[in-house]
Image (spheres, grey):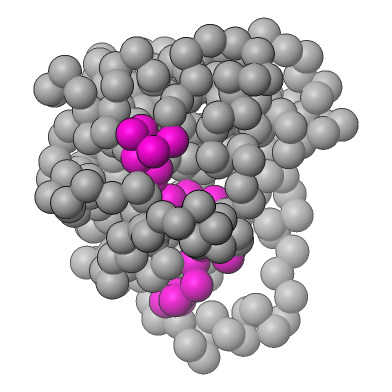
Amino acid sequence: MNASPVLAFLIPLRPKRDPMVWNSTCHLLRQTLNSLIAQSNGNWIACVAGHECPEFLADTNDGRISFHKVDFDQSLHEKRPVIDKSWKVAYASMCAANLQPKYHMLLDADDLLHRDLVSLVAGLPPSPAVVFEFGWEFDIGFRRALPRNNLASLCGSTTAYSREHFPMPMGRGWDEWNKVPAIKTGHNAVIADLDQRGLVPFLPQQRLVAYVTGHVSSLGRRHLKRPWRRRLAFWLLGKPLSHELKRDFQVL
């Protein structure tokens, strides 16, 4: 790996409370990390921040992947889950900052990346941000894929921010952590926020991010409740997860 990675992936992890949810979280995190390991360009790092380190992650020998234990109360997740996630993203960002990545990107612990995403970002001319509006929604329960042309409105794992335009925090404290754009700006307002700043993002036309639903995820059991309209949409507009999609996104 070069001294300065192309991309730093910031991965917040849900605390170990419900065994069923934790087992699913670990399984999905492994799948997410597999989609990074399979990248055609290996010049990336992944910083996972959480209260407990999954066993498989403690045993990894891939130096690009690191776990960072947070020291605030686990009960914050139950009381203020958005703040819990934000602080973990900020902590991961602080840990990644010393390696000076070109871009940094929130990656939820259950979403997947196409194997050519890092290669695409590495080959771009300088850009303040890369926003992946086009992507997929994978329903793991149905084993079906639905193309999405507005992925940033659904999924947080859709924007890679340039460190040049969006500096990373170098220390603890809200003044530093508030620099992290994934905390300051909701994923459904990224493009509007960039426009207000006078910044023009690069918008790839390829579908390189998969938003994974239909499971007991790091967000809790509510993902198992799928309204009939959503079920119908997947059956009518979606398609079975093909061999190509499973290969390119490392779907287990």
Task: Tell me which corner region of the image, top left, top right, bottom left or bottom right, holds residue 210.
Answer: bottom left
Along the line of sight, the residue nearer the viewer: 191 or 237: 191
Q: Residue at x 60, y 61 (%)?
A: 188
Say whether residue 228 is magenta.
no
* x and y, in percent, of residue 74 in the image: 76, 19
Q: Which residues are magenta?
A: 146-166
Q: Is residue 164 left or right of residue 182?
A: left
Residue at the (54%, 80%) spot, across then down: 234
Image position of 133 (left or right of 226): left
Q: Position of residue 189 (x, y in %)?
A: 60, 59
Q: Nearer the viewer, residue 67 or 129?
A: 129
Q: Position of residue 26 (x, y in %)?
A: 52, 33
Q: Residue furthest front?
A: 198
Position of residue 182 relative to residue 142, above or below, is: above
Q: Quadrant of the N terminus?
A: top left
* Residue 14, quarter of picture: top right
Which of 25/181 is in front? 181
In the image, residue 204 sits, relative to residue 2, either above or below, namely below
